[in-house]
């Protein structure tokens, strides 16, 4: 059993059982990780207020084959919409540190163009994967850019795509 302390951004939370929670964190040292928090949904929980999505926290967790948060202290709040935090969770690989992305988020410079550029998908000059026109959307699931017309033709919901600026 290993113990770690790192700064992190809380991306999402979900109920787990009757009183526990499952949190997805983007940690400075570890990248994206999912961790259990015991009794986070209990009325007397001292951690729940610190672990709200969008919170920057210093977190202490144990690696026991799976991760468990044992302590957290909120240090700030990111100005990122909850839906964008969930998209970021879906886009990031597990346990892969992204120091440039961490710095972008800490500076409060969140933009999808900046995030995608940092992760290697530069939207500047990107073309639609289907028709070659200027891209307006990025699909994290397919890791491709698309124009608005092709997104509609594919029967996709524009909400499930990331809007980019050409």
Image: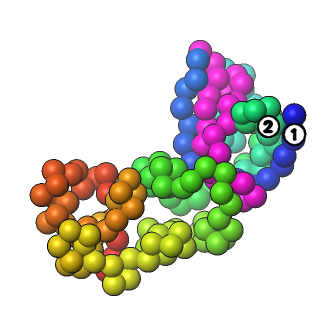
Looking at the rendered structure, which numbered label has been put on residue 63? Answer: 2
Query: How crowded is the residue under tag 2: few (<14 C-alpha within 10 Å), some, or many (20+)?
Result: few
Work out which quarter of the rendered image holds the N terminus and state it: top right
Q: Which element carries disc 2, helix, strand or loop?
A: strand
What residue appears at the point 54 percent right and 73 percent down from the top-left corner? 118
Q: Is residue 25 visible?
A: no
**Overall secondary structure of the magenta section:** strand
Compared with residue 34, is residue 26 higher up or lower down, i.e. above or below? below
Whether residue 147 is in magenta: the answer is no
The tag earlier along the polypeptide, 2 or 1, is 1
Looking at the rendered structure, which numbered label has been put on residue 2? Answer: 1
Where does the image place residue 13, in percent across and percent down from the top left? 56, 37
Compared with residue 53, is residue 143 higher up or lower down, i.e. above or below? below
Whether residue 28 is in magenta: the answer is yes
- Which one is nearer the viewer's eye here, 121 or 41? 121
Left or right of 45 on screen, residue 155:
left
Where does the image place residue 91, in percent across and percent down from the top left? 48, 55
Q: Which residues are magenta?
A: 18-40
Q: Is residue 72 visible?
A: yes
Work out which quarter of the rendered image holds the C terminus and state it: bottom left
What residue appears at the point 62 percent right and 28 percent down from the top-left corner? 21
């Amino acid at each position: 059993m290993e113990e770690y302390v790192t700064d992190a951004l809380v991306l999402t939370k979900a109920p787990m059982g009757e009183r526990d929670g499952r949190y997805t964190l983007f940690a400075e040292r570890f990248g994206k990780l999912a961790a259990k928090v015991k009794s986070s949904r209990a009325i007397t929980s001292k951690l729940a207020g610190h672990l709200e999505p969008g919170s920057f926290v210093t977190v202490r967790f144990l690696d026991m084959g799976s991760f468990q948060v044992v302590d957290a202290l909120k240090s700030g709040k990111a100005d990122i919409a909850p839906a964008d935090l969930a998209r970021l969770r879906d886009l990031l690989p597990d346990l892969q540190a992204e120091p440039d992305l961490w710095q972008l988020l800490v500076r409060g410079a969140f933009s999808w163009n900046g995030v995608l550029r940092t992760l290697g998908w530069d939207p500047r000059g990107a073309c639609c994967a289907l028709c070659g026109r200027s891209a307006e959307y990025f699909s994290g699931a397919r890791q491709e850019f698309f124009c608005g017309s092709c997104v509609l033709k594919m029967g996709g919901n524009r909400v499930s795509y990331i809007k980019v600026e050409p």
